[in-house]
Each structure stands twice: as structure tokens, then as C-alpha cells.
Amino acid sequence: MRVCIVYDCLYPHTPGGAERWYRNLAERLTGAGHDVTYLTLRQWEGDDAGLPGVEVVAVGPRFGLYTESGRRRIWPTVRFGFGVLRHLLSRGRGYDVVHTASFPYFSLLAAGLLRRRGGYRLSVDWHEVWTREYWREYLGPIGGRIGWSIQRRCARIPQRAFCFSRLHQGRLRELGVPDPTVLEGEYDGAGLRPGPEPREPVVVFVGRHIPEKRPGAVVPALARAREHAPELRAEIYGDGPERHRVLEAVRAEGLDDAVEVPGRVEDGRIDDALGRAFCLVLPSRREGYGLVVVEAAARGTPSVVVEEPDNASTELVEDGVNGVVASSAEPDELARAILRAHDAGPKLRASTADWFRRNERRLSLEQSLETILAAYAG
């Protein structure tokens, strides 16, 4: 089968959960004997994009994708959409399936426009579906109205729709998308079957430093938690436009000796940190899935997440079983959740490891790949 994957970022040149999903999908499809092309924006030097066995096509030049405030820039998404349009005009008939992310929407509009001409089936991953209210908050009254209208138009394109949470499945149905399929598995690995040995008194954050993920919220929460457990420390991994706010918070709370902010590091260091920590803290306001929660659970490490209307990562946490769901990201509430995970100790880590063992197959990339291949065939 000839499959064209469409996403404007490519892991590891750009980090992120969606980026890892599409790289893993491309590698698995190639390994299964399918012919895979990956359309993206250029993010690498030289001719080798570093994805063996996959034809990687840069349909646009290198861009800075985010503003200083952490929002996506409009022009790169438009430019990517035109690049996808040109590619599918010339090569669309050579694909059996075009598999694209819903966002950035202009590439989906291009793929939908040429669907009949190219004769390919269109599969669409909806990592997130934003509400009208969130669009207004994100882009203002006029921009939010435009964004909402484009999202709704994309939902009306004939497609095989996938999403990664029940939250967004429900929102797709509200937009009129028939039978969206939830892909629960993105984890590409195996459980490490950890024992009950003591962990370091460290909480870990892993993610892009953007306002929605609220990395800076970890710092004042840790300061409050240290009033009861002064040995606690934090390691905050990742990079982005909010990094300076994180560093400012560390200085303001006087936690230079208790908080490390090393920036973007190799995956091996992240794996080590998740294996040493007594919990992961992910105070995101908005998550389409929350892969790092599963990665932490695979190491027997519980997660602290925050109850928010747009946060699908809460679907991956059973409070008191494999983590704690905080009622808000306010310092006192988040500190209470961190202390719950800390005080639960080996018992919570053991139940987290057991939770992962029971859900490992359901949460695996292989499970989702089987669902996708069945959809391609159908």
C-alpha cells in the first residue's frame, strides 16, 4: 500500500507527542512493507532527514513555527498547505491513502480538495478539537471566529477520522463527523517491570515550554510542598517560549539549589529521570492525549495531572491508582497533589506498575497500528 503522511513537523528535529506519533507511524508502516512518503517542512541540514526507508519530502522551507508568546504562526501553516497542494496535484494519484493531521488545517483542506482527483482515501488524526470559546480566547473575537469556521469546514470533509481521547471523540461527533475512532495507543516501548525500591525525592516535568502546558506552575507548587517535605526537588525538561518564566520563578522562589531546568535533552536522560522520580507533574491546561503519562507509568512512576475542560490526559490517570488528579494548577492545590503522590510512596508506584501491565496492550502503538491498517484496507 502507498501511504502519504502529512505533518509539518518531524521528530526528533521538532520534539512533541504528535511528532513522535507520525515518526513511529511512518516507521511501523515501512516495517510492515508499505511504501511511505512523509510530507513536512524542512527542519534538518543537508539531504538526509534521518528517517530510513521513508521518502521525506520538504514541501516548504524552514520556519519558526511559534511566536514569542507560544502560539502557532499563521504564515508557516499557510505555506505548508500550499506545498501539500502542489505535491498532491503532481503525485496524488500515486497514493492509496493520505494520512494527515487535522492541524495545521490548510494541509487538510488541500488534501480534501484533491481527494477525488487523486483517488486516494483520506485518514485524519484529530489530536485536538477546540471549542468556540477556546478559539475566541486564543485568537480574539475575529480570529477565533475564523479559526472555528475553518475547523468546522475541515470536519465536513469526507474522511476516516481518528482521535486520541473520548473528550475529542465527543467533540468531533458534535461537529458532525460520523464514527470517529479513538486510538488509545501511542506508546512505543515495553514496561520495565520496576520493583518497589525507593525513588529520589524528585518530581519531573517533561514537555514543551508553552503557556498551555504551564511548566512554570511546578515551581511555586514545589515551594509549597517543601514546607512539609523540604527534601523535595524538581527537574523541568524541555524548551520553548515560556522557559524564561520558569527560570524567573525558580529565582523568585529561591529554589536554585532545588530545581534543575536543563532545557531540551536526549531521550535517554528523560527515561532516566522518569525512572528516578517519585512522580511526573504535568499541569497542562490543554492536552490532546498525554503520552508522557503512559511513558511514566511504564516505569512505575505515577503522574499528577490537572482537571481542566480541555485536558484529555486526565483520561489516562485513575486517581489513587496510577497518579493524582489535582483540582487546579494553583500552587496550594498542585502542592497537595504532589504530597499525596509522595506520601503514598511504594504502594502508589506498585499500583501504577500494575495499572500499566493491565493496560499495556490497549495503550500500545501496535494496537493503534492494527486499527489504522484495518481502516486503510476498508
Image (cartoon, rainbow, N blue to C red):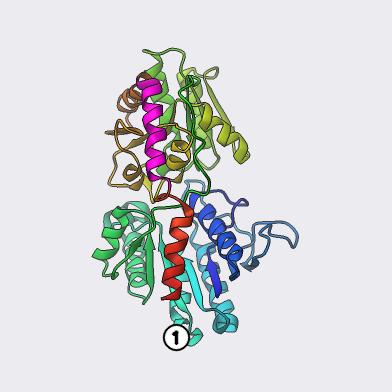
The residue that appears at 48% across and 80% down in the rendered structure is: 120
Residue lying farthest bottom? 117
Q: Position of residue 77 (x, y in %)?
A: 51, 64
Q: Position of residue 254 (x, y in %)?
A: 49, 17
Residue lying farthest right? 46
Q: Is residue 356 magenta?
A: yes
Above or below — where is 241 with respect to 85?
A: above
Q: Secondary structure at mark 1?
A: helix
Q: Give the amino acid at mark 1.
A: Arg
Above or below — where is 84 with respect to 334?
A: below
> Is residue 365 something one can see in this rendering?
yes
Image quarter hosting the C terminus: bottom left
Q: Position of residue 355 (x, y in %)?
A: 37, 38
Report whether 39 appears left or right of 213.
Answer: right
The answer to which of 69 and 273 lies nearer the viewer is: 273
Image quarter hosting the N terminus: bottom right
Q: Which residue is mark 1?
A: 116
Residue range (magenta): 344-360
Place residue 316 in its image quadrant: top left
Q: Position of residue 233 (x, y in %)?
A: 49, 20
Place residue 260 in its image quadrant: top right
Above or below — where is 284 with respect to 377?
A: above
Q: Main secondary structure of the magenta part?
A: helix
The residue that appears at 50% across and 20% down in the rendered structure is: 200
Within 10 Å of disc 1 (Cα), the crowding (few <14, some 14-19, many 20+) is few
Above or below — where is 132 with respect to 299?
A: below
Report whether 311 appears left or right of 297.
Answer: left
The answer to which of 192 and 63 lies nearer the viewer is: 192
The residue that appears at 34% across and 72% down in the rendered structure is: 153
> Is residue 103 something one can see in this rendering?
no
Q: Is residue 212 magenta?
A: no
Place residue 323 in its image quadrant: top left
